[in-house]
Image (spheres, rainbow, N blue to C red):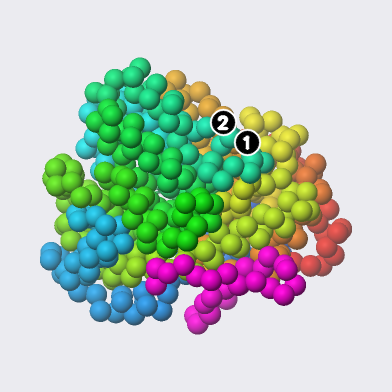
Amino acid sequence: MGKQQPVIRFYSGEDIPLELHKARIVQKLNLVPIERRLEALYEGGFNTFRLNTRDIFLDMLTDSGTNAMSDMQLAAMMHADDAYAGSQSFYRFQKAVEDVLKKKYVLPAHQGRAAENILAKAYIRKKGDLIPMNYHFTTALAHITQYGGRIVELLYDEAFRIDSSHPFKGNLHVEKLEQVIRETGVENIPFIRMEASTNLIGGQPFSIQNMREVRKVADAYGLRIVLDASLLGENAYLILQREPEFAGSTMGEVIEIMTGLADIVYFSARKLSSSRGGAICTNNHDIYLELEALVPLFEGFLTYGGISVREIEAMAVGLYETLDETMIRQSPDFIRYLVNSLMAKGVPMVTPPGVLGAHVNAMQLCEHIPQTQYPAGSLGAAFFLISGVRGMERGSISNQRDEEGNETYADMELLRLAVPRRVFTLSQIKYVEDRLVWLNENRRLIGGLKFIYEPPVLRFFMGGLAPVSDWPEKLMAKFRKDFGDSL
Ligand code: F0G
């Protein structure tokens, strides 16, 4: 483990991602007829979060809690130590955090946003406190604003160029960071947040060179860096692929450098290492003490943090497995394959291929739908209708309203098709490609959506929408015409 793996090439020269695992437990899937899928959309308010998996064929909503677990993780879960306090499972997890993330202190939390809640509660001391970051994640932003804080997003222009070839679109704009710090004053900046594999711009990594520069600025002004490490392994893998200095390095070496540049590392273990849980890690005893009291208040005792001890065992083993490049690379390699195949057939995608999922550029594919009618949400609903594949809207529906209650339109309108680790087969990926190519050719039939029920916080989860016309029925009729009696 930890050693970089040799390349496996096909004689044909094709770029086919080869799995280095086999399936030993499987789950049966159903593909229901398009007529049922249309009903399901009306029942779920045209919001893919509200669909029932009974109606879903391939669930590409997220990788969160849906990555495949390994045999070693399941085995570890069997020797969990049930104890309210002082559980051996926690000490094994603590050792894994120290071995892999190189942090001595760890505070468990029930998932990533629970860690965000604790950090926001502890460090946002007054209204208007500003958190500079490469880009927000929905839950991080919601917690920061909940406690009166604000954010400023500091990406380079290249990050917003959808069809870019820039290897590190998640880089934090260092010059702008210094300017923001000078204008705002260090006393109003609780910390700088860097998100590994910047989720909402298409799972795009930052480079170690960039993080080193951010560290220099942070040190010059005495500021702390908080690293959102939920997608740490994938960011590290892309550093191995794309940053020449690390071409021959191991996952472990790159991860150690990344976490070493941050004062606080937090993560959603639903993504990083397992299927449940989260944690906040640091080497700084003062930071540990600042946060310690909040864990029993919001989560649970310090050695279980609201997570079952079985899940803590799985988190520990999962952390060690993050050092195995063959495990981490499966999802980004499938994504690269899918993105490249779709691009070759004219489907507009975010490039370069990132991590977590393939991201369709709905602003372009649905250019006839104004942002006021949510092109990414419309595309997500249309794609589910014609394929049974559930993706996630990552556009204006996922944005929150500003303080005055006005709509804020997203920089990008994306449909994310998540590729959870070691879950799908290549023929299923080919099916996604096939249906998306058809939908692109029939894109003019996709229409807009409007809110009919809008919750005040994180509206994208439970919000209800309706089509602005009878476009779903027309799209279904065209599907029947072209596919006959096919599901
Ligand atoms: N940070 C990042 C970068 C994330 O992607 C997520 C979750 C969180 C924090 C919050 O973690 O869900 O355990 O509370 N992302 C999921 C997704 C929900 O589908 O992208 P959580």
The image quarter containing residue 131 is top left
* Residue 411 magenta-highlighted: no
- Image coordinates of residue 447 in percent, x first then y, are 73, 40
Left or right side of 475 for 286: left
Can I make out residue 49 in this image? no
Identify which residue is drawn at 44% across, 25% down.
176
Residue at numbered disc 1: 161
Indicate yes or no whether the magenta region holds residue 3: yes
Q: CA distance from mark 1 to mark 2?
A: 7 Å
Front position in the image: 279 or 96: 96
The span picked out in magenta is: 1-29
Q: Which residue lies at the image location 42% right of the left edge and 23% below the top edge? A: 403
SS under mark 2: helix
Placement of the C terminus among the 4 image quadrants: bottom right
Q: Which residue is identified by label 2?
A: 157
Circle 2 packing at 10 Å, graded few (<14), some (14-19), many (20+), is few
Asked whether mark 1 and ligand 1 are closer than 8 Å, the reply comes as no
Residue at image location 66% in from the left, 60% down from the top? 337
Instruction: Give the tally of numbered discs.
Output: 2
The residue tagged with tag 1: helix, strand or loop?
Answer: loop
Magenta stretch: dominant secondary structure: loop
Q: Classify residue 339 as left or right of residue 121.
A: right
